[in-house]
Image (spheres, rainbow, N blue to C red):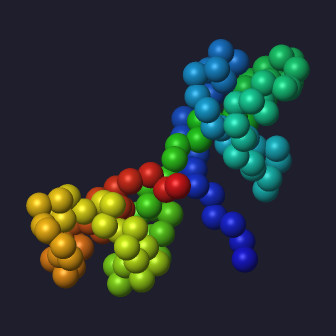
Amino acid sequence: MKMKRKYKQGDRVDSVAELLEHDWFIVRFGPRTTKTMHKAVLGEWKLKLCQQFVDGGRIFIAVKLTNAEYYGDMTDDQIVDMLETDLCEYCEGRKGVVGQCDGEFCDEAIEAWKEAYVK
């Protein structure tokens, strides 16, 4: 099974100094090879290599996907099955209910979950 990325490509990095401002980057190593890399890995590179990649327009800020983007091919029923009781963490309506809510607020909880960043 192919792994899905939890980040999408954001703006191109225009200076080496920008590498200190963000945690995650998408780096192009060739026409078909890209990797999501943490700033600590890039920090191990020599400054000249970092500058070459920046000048070549091959480093981009990695933007975290939302659950809706990452799990976009799933229906709401599949999401409920996958999350089970974890979905309740995203439920605002449940806070005012004593005991079980019988799924009364699940639609709102699903929407809140979709807006959250993927873990």
Residues 85 and 55: in front is 85
- 68 or 52, which lies in front? 68
Residue 77, relative to residue 117: is it above or below? below
Q: Residue furthest front?
A: 99
Q: Is residue 48 left or right of residue 104?
A: right
Mark yes or no: residue 38 visible. Answer: yes
In the figure, residue 69 lies in which quadrant? bottom left
Q: Residue at x 85, y 26 (%)?
A: 45
Query: Where residue 37 appears, x then y in whole percent?
Result: 72, 41
Q: Nearer the viewer, residue 61 or 23?
A: 23
> Which quadrant holds the N terminus?
bottom right
> Which residue is at 53% across, 43% downward?
63
Residue 13 found in image quarter: top right
- The residue depicted at 63 percent of the width and 37 percent of the height is 24
Picture coordinates of residue 35, whole percent (x, y): 75, 48
Say left or right for 37 vs 109: right
Residue at x-position 37% and y-position 73%: 85
Q: Is residue 35 above or below residue 39?
A: below
Is residue 55 toward the left or the right of residue 12 in the image?
A: right
Q: Quadrant of residue 12?
A: top right
In the image, residue 6 lies at what x, y percent?
A: 58, 55
User: In the figure, 71 relative to 13: above or below?
Assistant: below
How many numbered marks are there? Answer: 0
**Can I make out residue 15 in this image?**
no
